Image (tube, rainbow, N blue to C red):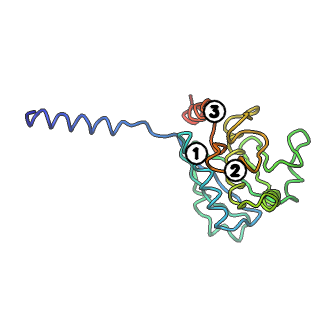
Amino acid sequence: MGISAMVFWVFALGIGSGQAEQKPSITVLVYNYANVSAANLAAGEALATRSYRAAGIEISWIECAVSARKSQRFRECEQAIGKHWLFLRIITERMASGIVPGSKGREDALGIALVSHAFVLYERIVDRANAWGLAESVILGHTMAHELGHLLLGDYSHTASGVMQPLVHRQDLKLESGQFLFEPKQATKLRARLRGE
């Protein structure tokens, strides 16, 4: 192979790698009203991120102030501008009683999804974690991924298996169970929606 042929070949490779398809992404603004510890919140976000990354979607989390006196610490939240952003509110049981509509809320539900807001009921997650002998962050991460999935996929997005199944059981919360993943059709739908297709 001559020098000119090698240069052309390397140049062509460079062009191809620069045109790799960019993964769709979303930004989630997180409001931690339930005072979840930083470690549990970070671990839960990491698990939810794995669910979306496996579906070909990048997700970034921005912590937001839950009171005016904390707003200085959370300037990044105010500056979060993007095409795809959602709100995630981690709330107490008392707060949940004011937002749970009769037809959508259930006593055993760990979260609620309404329009562009996902709500995670943290006290229920703690209770479930204690009953099942699991880390709170595991149930938190699964619930975050599930409720954000409802916001992106719309109504009637439950599946027989995977992260969007309506009821979660202890054995479903092992990473190797596959229950942290979106079903392939849903992963395709998520990517298409985020690309605006």
Please, is residue 42 above or below residue 168 in the view? below
Q: Earlier in the sequence, mark 2 or mark 1?
A: 1
Task: Tell me, for residue 186, which label it has, or none.
Answer: 3
Residue type at mark 3: give it.
Gln
Q: Tell me the SS state at disc 2.
A: helix
- The C terminus appears in which quarter of the rendering? top right
Give the Cα separation between the discs numbered 3 and 1: 16 Å
Q: Residues within 10 Å of mark 1 (few under 14, many from 20)?
A: some
Quadrant of residue 166 in the image?
A: top right
Give the Cα separation between the discs numbered 2 and 1: 24 Å
Q: Tell me the SS state at disc 3.
A: helix
In this rendering, would 53 be left or right of 30? left
Label 2 close to label 1 by CB (< 8 Å): no
Residue type at mark 1: give it.
Ile
Viewer-nearest of discs 3 and 1: 3
Write the residue at 70% across / 52% down: 88
Task: Tell me, for residue 173, which label it has, or none.
Answer: 2
Q: Residues within 10 Å of mark 2 (few under 14, many from 20)?
A: some
Coordinates of residue 29 in the picture (x, y in percent): 65, 54
Please, is residue 114 above or below residue 33 in the view? above
Write the residue at 59% across / 35% down: 187
Q: Earlier in the sequence, mark 2 or mark 3?
A: 2
Q: Earlier in the sequence, mark 3 or mark 1?
A: 1
